[in-house]
Structure formats: structure tokens, C-alpha cells
Amino acid sequence: MTDPVKPETLVREREEIFTLLGHLPDREVAARARLLASRNLASFAAHRAKGPASRELLWMIAEVATETVYGPGAIERLEGFVTYCEALFAAARIAKTLEAPDGLV
């Protein structure tokens, strides 16, 4: 399972945010770009996860990020969801090491 994307590597995601939402403060763009990257990474990883707990946690990340990336929200709320997604990624990594494959992948 891959680690969440680092903020400095989010060029494509930032461009997508600007294209769809227009000019926003840098801090908000950064949070939304991280949510977008988290959604993409979690969705990709969920399709390859070999255990049910790690897969479910990855789908939770994808769902949370999808619901918040383009929606309204104060910057503090968006950054809170970024932290939440990072915590779920950490939990998914732990689950991956503890659980047995379920044979779905």
C-alpha cells in the first residue's frame, strides 16, 4: 500500500482545483488538492487490497475525500478531513499487516 501523497507533488491536482473551482486561497487549494490525491490513491489501492479491513478503510478514504473535495467548507474543516484521511491511511497500513488475504483480488 502506498503512502499518502506529499503536498509538494500535487501539481496536477492543483490545476484541476483551479480549473473547476476558480481562484481560491493557496491554503484551501492545498487542502483540496490533498483530498483529491487521497481519493485517487485510496480508490486505486482499494482495488488491489488483499484483505477486507484494509480495503474497507481505503474505500472510506475515497468516499470521504469525494464528498469534501469540491463541496463547500471552511478551510479548517477541509484540513480536518485531510488529517482524517491520513489517519485512515495509517489504519489501512496496519490492517494490511494484520489480516489474511480474503482471495477477492
Image (cartoon, rainbow, N blue to C red):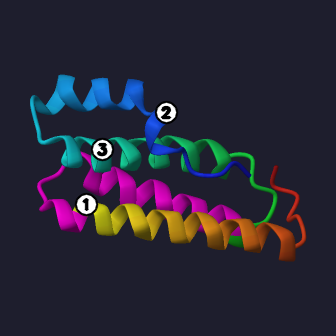
Q: Say if mark 3 contacts mark 2, CB within 8 Å.
A: no
**Are the residues tagged 2 and 1 within 8 Å (C-beta)?**
no
Residue bearing mark 1: 78
- Specify whether 104 is left or right of 28: right
Based on the displayed image, in which of its 4 quarters is residue 21 positioned? top left
x 85%, y 77%: residue? 98
x and y, in percent, of residue 33 in the image: 34, 41
**Residue 30 numbered tag:** 3
- Mark 3 falls on what kind of element? helix
Say whether disc 3 or disc 2 marks the residue closer to the N-terminus: 2
What secondary structure characterizes most of the magenta part? helix
Query: Is residue 70 on the magenta stretch?
Result: yes
Nearest to N terminus: mark 3 or mark 1: 3
* Residue 46 in the image, given as x and y percentages of width and height: 65, 52
Please give left or right for residue 83 compared with residue 69 in the image: right
Q: Where is residue 59 in the image (x, y as percent from the top left)?
A: 54, 59
Q: Which of marks 3 and 1 is in front?
A: 3
Crowding around mark 2 (Cα neighbors within 10 Å: few <14, some 14 to 19, many 20+) is few
Q: What element carries label 2?
A: helix
Residue positioned most to the bottom: 98
Q: Residue type at mark 2: give it.
A: Thr
Residue at x-position 46% and y-position 63%? 85
Spatial distance from mark 3 to mark 2, Cα to Cα? 11 Å
Q: Judge from the rendering whether residue 105 lies leftward or rightward of residue 41; answer left or right.
A: right
User: Is residue 14 in sight in this rendering?
Assistant: yes
| Label ID, residue 9 | 2
Q: Which amino acid does label 1 sit on?
A: Leu
Q: What residue type is labelled 3?
A: Ala
Residue at x 85% of width, y 70% of height: 97
Magenta segment: does it hold 38? no
